[in-house]
Amino acid sequence: MQDSHFLRPAITALVIKRLQRGESINLYGEPGIGKTRLLEDIRQSGLADTHIISVSFRGYQYSYDGFCKAVWTEADLEYSVFLMNLSC
């Protein structure tokens, strides 16, 4: 992991360690605090077997189904496959 380019090396390293343990991370917060930069730093870290999905919660506060569809679209997966797997 090359951390010389990270905006906040300690925080980025902590998040990467959690991802390496198999944990999921949800980032949220006010605009301008560095969420997008943290994701970019993680992308550039070379972390294996990691897929970063970025979906804004705005517009989905009343539509969990819509939010799930947006996540699956961002993940480049078929939402109908997800629904079929849930019913198995």
Image (tube, rainbow, N blue to C red):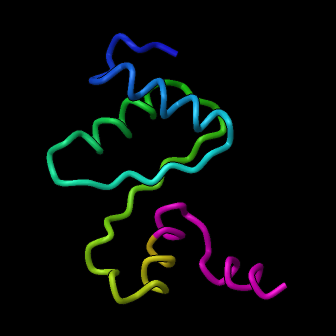
- The reply to whether the magenta stretch includes residue 58 is no
Residue at image position (39%, 56%) is: 54
- Asked whether 83 or 11 is in front, the reply is 11
Quadrant hosting residue 82: bottom right
- Give 47 or 26, whichever is nearer the viewer: 26
Residue, x 60% and y 79% (percent of image)?
A: 79
Left or right: residue 52 compared with residue 48: left
Q: Which residues are magenta?
A: 71-88
Residue 28 percent across, percent down from the top left:
32, 55
**Residue in the image at 45% along x and 54% along y:** 26
Q: Residue furthest left?
A: 32
The quadrant in which the C terminus is found is bottom right
Left/right of residue 16 with respect to residue 11 in the rendered view: right
Q: Position of residue 12 (x, y in %)?
A: 41, 28
- The answer to whether residue 51 is left or right of residue 53 is right
Magenta span: chief secondary structure = helix
Can you say whether 1 is above or below 43 in the image?
above
Indicate the quadrant where residue 61 lies. Answer: bottom left
Percent x, y for residue 67?
Answer: 43, 77
Q: Position of residue 19 (x, y in %)?
A: 59, 38
